Amino acid sequence: MDTMTIADPLPRAPLRSELARFYRTWRAMSRGSFPIIAPIRATKGLVGIIRDPHETAHVFTLFEALIGPLEATAMAHFAESARGKALLQNPPALIPALSDRAALAALPDGSLGRAYLDFANQEGITADGLIAASDAGRVFEFIPGEDIYRRIGDYLRDSHDLWHVVTGYQGDIIGELALLAFTFAQMGNLGMGVLVVLAATLGPHLPTPIDNEAAEAIREGFRRGRKAKWLATVDWVPRLEEPLDEVRRALNLDDPPAYPVRRVNPGEPLLQLAR
């Protein structure tokens, strides 16, 4: 595999150019009746996460209600890049590929697709489960003709569990927060940043506390996100049959980090504030 052909470096540009990208995205999303910050909806999503962190719909509500200027700019980079344009013009059949468990099971040991299947089985998830949660947590609908940023967001959603696999983070509370920190470093979604900072700040009050070791794992997730290639515009379907180790090297990802795996029990609130 040619390691130069599957991903671009993390996009960076002069401040003036980034401001112009943000303005274009903000205008387009405003035309589509899709604000980049919706505080009331964001509060609803955050409260829902605290009450039931296993209800993924609340997570999508928060992230969609707090897109923020950094992710708006990142979306512009996606839409302008050669890889992003190709994904938007010819959307890959990612969900069907991730849903075909027989085909995934037939892939070679050590391949990305087999590793994804193992992850899905371990976590008890399905490829279309995130779509259902996303639809349940959806805050706004674009008007016809202005949906390019919705399509970008959907592609990032559909590939979320592949990001888990290539980064090596499990679906436990620390793994999810570390991946959110990684994703924030790559895309800048304000809701992700708020959730990570809130969890780190209130870590001692969690039913499964975030101690120094866990907090360091989350910080490391951010650092890894800044160091890695840009995962946003990777065409994942042809990667499924490739060795996971080679895909990681191509994405400038080091070996999966060792971190304390901790899970929140079903029905347990995310926070238990001291009285």
Image (cartoon, rainbow, N blue to C red):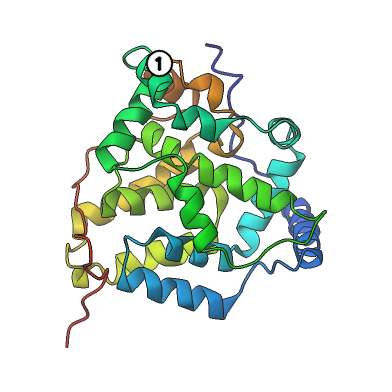
Q: How many marks?
A: 1
User: Which residue shows up at 42% across the image and 52% down it?
Assistant: 180
Q: Is residue 34 left or right of residue 271?
A: right
Residue 123 versus residue 57 in the image, above or below: above
- Which type of secondary structure does the marked residue at label 1 adopt? loop
Who is closer to the viewer here, 31 or 183? 31
Q: Is residue 255 visible?
A: no
Residue 51 versus residue 113 in the image, above or below: below
Q: Is residue 43 visible?
A: yes
Residue 225 on image: x %, y %: 46, 43
Q: Amino acid at mark 1?
A: Pro
Residue 170 versus residue 240 in the image, above or below: below
Pick out the residue farthest to the bottom: 275
User: Which residue shows up at 67% across the image and 53% down it?
Assistant: 150
User: Which residue shows up at 52% across the image and 35% down it?
Assistant: 95
Who is closer to the viewer here, 228 or 156? 156
User: Which residue shows up at 56% across the image and 36% down it?
Assistant: 230
Residue 51 quadrant: bottom left
Residue 168 versus residue 219 in the image, above or below: above
Residue 2 quadrant: top right
Residue 194 quadrant: bottom left
Q: Is residue 67 left or right of residue 80?
A: left
Who is closer to the viewer here, 188 or 267? 267
Residue 249 on image: x %, y %: 44, 22
Residue 7 on image: x %, y %: 59, 28
**Residue occupied by mark 1:** 243
Q: Is residue 64 left or right of residue 172?
A: right
Quarter of the picture containing the C terminus is bottom left
Residue 216 on image: x %, y %: 27, 52
